[in-house]
Each structure stands twice: as structure tokens, then as C-alpha cells.
Image: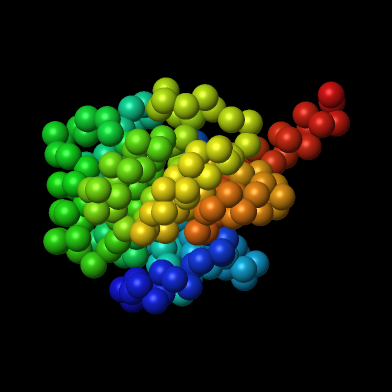
Amino acid sequence: MILTPDALEALRSQLIVSCQAYPGEPMRDPRTTGQVAASAVIGGAAAVRVQGIADVQFTRAAVEVPVIGLWKDGHDGVFITPTLRHALAVANAGAHVVAIDGTRRPRPDGLSLKQTVDGIHAESHALAMADCGSYADAMAAVEAGADLIGTTLAGYTGERTKTVGPDLELLAEIAGAGLAKPLIAEGRIHTPEQARQALDAGAFAVVVGTAITHPASITGWFKDALES
């Protein structure tokens, strides 16, 4: 399935669930990722977001909704699908959308963001989602031709203070620019109320991950509340 403009429009005001586990965790298994993604779809997720080549492959086989894929390589700087090679591998694994670092920082392969987006478009059927950290990032990503703009890296690049919840101010600022591209809210959305606030701030769709699919974090929240 190629994600057509009409199919993309179907994601408007919908929930996208990020299904990821960290290295060393019991759930860090591509088969488990696919099962978690399928469970999220039963609950109403209109699309899912997964990390890792095998995870994309297993998830594509497990669900019939759009799959946003990425490949984290490293832990600092530009590490979310950092190069065109990473991006094409994710696309070839079956991702309908490839999420890439959409900041203005130098990329490991020396390519510009535009060159990376152009490469994805030229060599695959996938769309490109730019994970941005600021308003300037978002504007640059639109200029580079990204198909979707995400606030995934807000608070993680040094340009903005990390907010306790979603960066609603950034969402509103980007939405106010009247982008012709879907604006995806992502990052620190931990409650249904915050998801609604993100949509009201101008998001096209909302990504929720940890609060739905990361049992260790959710358990920790309850434990901390009981011990406070």
C-alpha cells in the first residue's frame, strides 16, 4: 500500500501509537512490537510508529494501517534515521512513512535534509516525516520537501526548554504559520487530556508512545505516586 494524499488525510485528528521498547528490555523483540501495534490498532490507532528494520517488517505483517518507520542509530546528536542509507533501509522494510531527524544539524553522511528527503522520494514509495525540535526546524523541513512535520525533538536539541508535557506553544506557533503539510504532535503526551490539548493547539494528528506502550514507565508512574 502506497500512502496516497487521500490515505494521509484519513489520519486527520487521529491517534498514532508509537510502539517501541529499549535495548535490553523484555519487550525488545520485533514479534512483540508487531503484537503491540496490532493491539493498538484494535484500540483505535489510525497508524503506528515503530523503530528498527525487523520491527517495521513484523508490524507491516501484523497491521493494515500506515506504518511510520525509523531507525535509531546512536543516542546523541542526529540519531533518528540519520542518513539516507538508513532511510532507504526503513522504506525497503515496508514503512509507508520514514521518520528522519528533521533538524538543521549536520547529518552524519554530509547530505542536507533536502537531499535526504529527495533521495527518499526518488528511490522509494515512502513519504518523509521530519522530526523537528523548533519552529526554525519545521520551516526548514517544509522547504526541504518533507511530507509531514513532527515536534518529536522539541526540548532535545538545545533550542527549546524541555516542557513537562507536550510543547503546546511550539505546536501553536508552527500551526499558526499555515503549513501546507500535516503537523504531527509528538513527545511527552502522557494523558488523553494532553492529547486533546495538542490537537486543539493545531496538530493534524497526535502520536502517543510511552503512555500506551511502555509498561516499565507506566508502572513507575504509579509506583512513584504511591510512594510520594
Question: Where on the picture, by quarter, is residue 181?
Answer: bottom left
Q: Quadrant of the C terminus?
A: top right
Question: Where on the picture, by quarter, is residue 140?
Answer: top left
Q: Position of residue 72 (x, y in %)?
A: 36, 40
Residue depicted at x 22% and y 30%: 106
Q: Is residue 215 above or below residue 90?
A: above
Question: Where on the picture, by quarter, is residue 54?
Answer: bottom left
Residue depicted at x 23% and y 67%: 125
Front in this rendered view, residue 25 or 4: 4
Residue depicted at x 39% and y 50%: 149
Residue depicted at x 35% and y 36%: 136
Q: Quadrant of the N terminus?
A: bottom left
In this orientation, does residue 211 appear? no
Q: How many numbered marks, from 0 up?
A: 0
Relative horizontal placement of residue 137, taking residue 215 as reference (left or right): left
Relative horizontal placement of residue 178, taking residue 219 as reference (left or right): left
Relative horizontal placement of residue 126, taking residue 67 as reference (left or right): left
Q: Position of residue 142 (x, y in %)?
A: 30, 50
Front in this rendered view, residue 81 or 119: 119
Q: Position of residue 195 (x, y in %)?
A: 64, 51
Q: Is the image coloured rainbow, by chain, by secondary structure, or in one colour?
A: rainbow
Front in this rendered view, residue 26 or 195: 195
Q: Position of residue 159 (x, y in %)?
A: 41, 25
Q: Is residue 97 above or below residue 52?
A: below
In this orientation, does residue 4 appear? yes
